[in-house]
Amino acid sequence: MRLATLIVGEIILLFASILVFRSAWTLLDQYYGQSNLWAMLIIGVILSVIALVLINYEVKCELYKKNHKASK
């Protein structure tokens, strides 16, 4: 597994989760929220999906390599 790719994916996921949870929390406190909250929420969700796909892909590649080596 490319460790650097996994670390980048986790950093993106961490940053995205901050945006998502901060936005959701503030939206719960206000009925309409500030104008930037919806944008931060959407960006956070998109970054979360990208990071999870990236991490999932790398883990699948690693598992495939281990299974392929074990079968030889």
Image (cartoon, grey):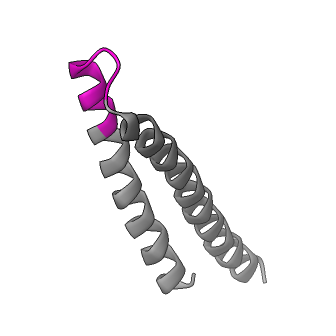
Q: Is residue 2 above or below residue 23?
A: below
Considering the whole magenta stretch, tell me its main secondary structure: helix
Outermost residue, left direction? 29
State which quadrant residue 67 falls in. bottom right
User: Dividing the image into 4 quarters, which one contains the C terminus?
Assistant: bottom right
Residue appearing at x 48%, y 85% in the figure: 4
Is residue 53 left or right of 69 when viewed as pictured? Answer: left
Is residue 36 left or right of 51 when viewed as pictured? Answer: left
Q: Is residue 5 above or below residue 31?
A: below
Is residue 8 left or right of 33 when viewed as pictured? Answer: right
Residue appearing at x 32%, y 37% in the figure: 23
How many discs appear?
0
What segment is highlighted magenta in the picture?
A: 23-33
Q: Is residue 44 above or below residue 3?
A: above
Residue appearing at x 53%, y 79% in the figure: 5
Outermost residue, right direction? 72
State which quadrant residue 15 falls in. bottom left
Q: Which of 67 and 31 lies nearest the eye of the viewer? A: 31
**Residue 38 % position (x, y):** 44, 35
User: Dividing the image into 4 quarters, which one contains the N terminus?
Assistant: bottom right
Residue appearing at x 51%, y 41% in the figure: 42
Q: Which of 50 and 1 lies nearest the eye of the viewer? A: 50
**Residue 59 % position (x, y):** 58, 66
**Residue 69 % position (x, y):** 71, 83
Q: Which of 21 and 57 lies nearest the eye of the viewer? A: 21
Outermost residue, top direction? 31
State which quadrant residue 21 falls in. top left
**Residue 16 % position (x, y):** 41, 53
Q: Residue 27 magenta-drawn?
A: yes
